[in-house]
Amino acid sequence: MQKLKAFLINNRFLIVMDDPSDVYYWDGLLRVLADTSTGSRMIWITRKMSLPPNLKTRSDPYPLRLEADEESWGLFTYALNKIVRRCGGLPLLIVKLAEALSQKDATIEEWSRALQQLCHDQEKVWSNTLCRIYKDLSLYMRRCLFSLTLFFHDSDIPIRMLITLWVAEDLVQTEGKNEALEDLAQRCLNLLIAKGMVQVTKKLLNGNVKIIRLPDALTQYWLISKAQQATALGDHIYRRSELFPGNDMIRRPVNHLDRDDL
């Protein structure tokens, strides 16, 4: 306690104690750090309505009021939204999560176990999905899919920028067909959307896709399975090194967004 006092006594600090179990220990801490001339403060958060008689404070307790119905619903939906997003938009997982939580007691332990099971099922579902993708897609389409992991997590990706990037990075190939690379990149993207590997977040007035993003669940799975990312992108880098021997640096184009991209 004295070492803590010596460390904090001449510094400005803010200590927040969240429902401490040992009240007498914190009472001693208050006595040691009672000097607030430096502007320091200590906040004690507790679920108990009454304070211990030996706990001396310089201000009256501030009781938090109960939430109104609209505020309660807003807080609940905020927390629930983060849980549902972990399903990655998969209807099967969403229904399974709802069934699991409805059959469990509303306790932290029961719901935590249900969410852990969801993570396990989620990884299994996406693992099976990626295996099917590898069997159905050509190599260049796999490269395009895995290149999306280079974007920041949960970021919106403009289609115009993405197609330009795919073409500039030589990720798409015509395979002998008389087809523009931009058209081939658009067709590749449409197929990934149809297979549910990317989510459409914004469309143009004519119905064309404008902005996409990766599903949260898919991004989390790829972050765990970095080996698959390295393999897919590594093949592309290896092929580029064969085409340009002696040049180990893979130059990446600068992405420029104009007003039409946003």
Image (spheres, rainbow, N blue to C red):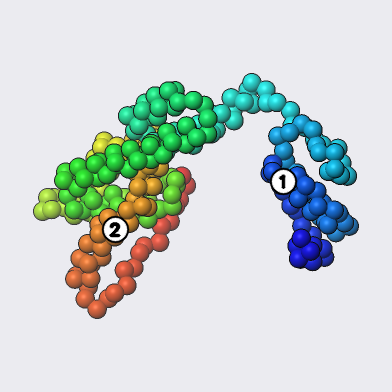
Q: Residue at x 18, y 53 (%)?
A: 139
Query: What SS does tag 2 mark?
Result: helix
Q: Residue at x 64, y 21 (%)?
A: 69
Q: How many neighbours does mark 1 have within 10 angstroms: few (below 14), some (14-19), or many (20 or more)?
A: few
* Cα distance between the residues tagged 1 and 2: 47 Å
Marks counted in the figure total 2
* Quarter of the figure that contains the N terminus: bottom right
Q: Reply above or below: 155 against 170.
A: above
The residue shown at (32%, 43%) is: 123
Q: Out of 176 and 95, give the one closest to the viewer.
A: 95
| Residue that protrudes farthest toward the bottom in the picture | 246
Q: Earlier in the sequence, mark 1 or mark 2?
A: 1
Residue 2 vs 114, above or below: the answer is below
In the image, residue 144 lies at what x, y percent?
27, 51
Q: Residue furthest top?
A: 69
Residue at figure coordinates x 85%, y 43% from the top left = 54
State the residue position of label 1. 22
- Residue 247 lies left or right of residue 151; in this view the side is left
Q: Nearer the viewer, mark 1 or mark 2?
A: 1
Q: Nearer the viewer, residue 78 or 175?
A: 78
User: Disc 2 marks which amino acid?
Assistant: Ala
The quadrant where residue 186 appears:
top left
Camera sees residue 198: no
The residue indicated by pointer 2 is: 227
Between 143 and 53, which is closer to the camera in this rendering?
A: 53
Q: Dot 2, how many residues are within 10 Å of its Cα: few (below 14), some (14-19), or many (20+)?
A: few
Q: Quadrant of residue 39?
A: bottom right
- Residues under numbered marks 1 and 2 in contact, where contact means CB atoms less than 8 Å apart: no
Which three-letter amino acid code belongs to the residue tagged 1? Asp
* Residue 127 in view here: yes
Residue 204 pos. (x, y %): 39, 35
